[in-house]
Image: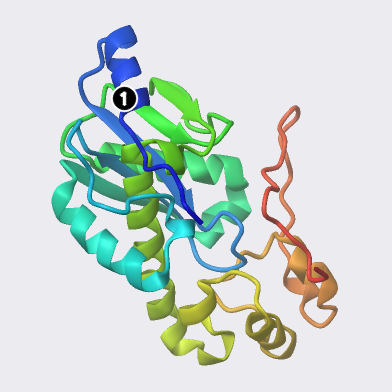
């Protein structure tokens, strides 16, 4: 399906309205997975013309995405990754875990950005960062699209490595997301040390339900439940 290539429109707007010079695009991957970390990439690209075919990582084939990620790592001005572990996700909830992973990525950049373009509708990052949220920013903004591709390829590689000790779960193919192979392995073997144990899929596994972790939410707080799909879908 044809798609419009991403542009620097949002970056130019931020530069004009805020005076920001260094702008990072931020995107995450792994929010809806049942296993593995949630990973955030922060990428600074400047206003240069991006590599041909850059777009949201989900619109690319595995082969093209992998090749493009290698090209982007050399092309971007700088990039950094941040992760929140399954244990942190279970303890903090997804929204706070995303904030932690994004902060880790941004703080690992060689130069602190003046502003951040964050993919999506909600600002899970907050102060002290100056944030502009952009729905489908991974398709429309160059820096966010670059972050999307790098984050996806790096996390997929990480999950494949984690899966070497848990071959029955197919992490190299499903990256910790629910799949028939993943579900069957969970039912037979139970969760691995890489699984998120506060999530709803355990409710459908009576023999493993005792492993589920329940968070005690502070008064007025809201659990980050996006992507916590149950077993039946």
Quarter of the image where one finds residue 117: top left
Q: How many marks?
A: 1
Q: In percent of the image, x 28 and y 37: which residue is there?
A: 107
The location of residue 100, given as percent across then percent down, is 45, 42
Depicted 175 relative to depicted 40: above or below: below
Report x, y in % for residue 1. 51, 57
Q: Is residue 126 above or below residue 97?
A: above
Name the residue beneath numbered marker 1: 11
Indicate the position of residue 198 as horizontal and vertical percent values: 69, 59
Q: For this view, does 78 lie left or right of residue 136? A: left
**Could you tell me which secondary element the residue under label 1 belongs to?**
helix
Q: Is residue 41 visible?
A: no
Front residue (pair 81, 203): 81
Seen in the picture, residue 37 relative to 162 is either above or below; the reply is above
In this picture, residue 171 sits left or right of residue 108:
right
69 over 13 or under it: above or below:
below
From the viewer's side, name the closer residue of 117 and 63: 63
Residue 189 in sight from this viewpoint: yes
Disc 1: CA contacts within 10 A as few (<14), some (14-19) or many (>=20): many
Name the residue at the front extreme.
Answer: 2
Q: Identify which residue, 17 or 127, lies in the foreground.
A: 17
Residue drawn at x 27%, y 61% is 68
- Residue that appears at 64% across and 81% down: 182
Image coordinates for residue 139, horizontal then vertical, percent: 44, 43
Where is residue 180, by image quadrant? bottom right
Horizontally, residue 226 falls left or right of residue 86, namely right
């Amino acid at each position: 399906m044809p798609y419009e290539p991403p542009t620097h429109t949002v970056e130019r707007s931020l530069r004009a309205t805020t005076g920001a010079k260094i702008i990072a695009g931020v995107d995450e991957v792994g929010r809806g997975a049942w296993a593995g970390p949630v990973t955030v990439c922060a990428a600074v690209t400047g206003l240069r013309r991006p590599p041909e075919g850059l777009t949201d990582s989900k619109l690319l084939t595995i082969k093209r995405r992998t090749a493009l990620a290698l090209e982007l790592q050399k092309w971007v001005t700088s990039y950094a990754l941040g992760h929140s572990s399954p244990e942190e996700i279970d303890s903090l909830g997804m929204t706070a875990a995303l904030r932690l992973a994004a902060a880790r990525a941004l703080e690992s950049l060689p130069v602190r950005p003046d502003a951040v373009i964050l993919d999506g509708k909600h600002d899970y990052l907050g102060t002290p960062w100056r944030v502009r949220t952009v729905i489908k920013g991974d398709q429309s903004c160059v820096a966010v699209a670059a972050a999307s591709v790098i984050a996806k390829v790096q996390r997929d590689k990480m999950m494949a490595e984690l899966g070497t000790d848990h071959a029955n779960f197919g992490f190299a193919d499903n990256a910790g997301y629910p799949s028939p192979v993943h579900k069957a392995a969970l039912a037979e073997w139970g969760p691995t040390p890489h699984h998120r144990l506060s999530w709803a899929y355990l409710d459908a596994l009576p023999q493993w339900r005792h492993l589920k972790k329940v968070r005690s939410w502070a008064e007025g707080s809201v659990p980050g439940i996006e992507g916590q799909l149950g077993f039946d879908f």
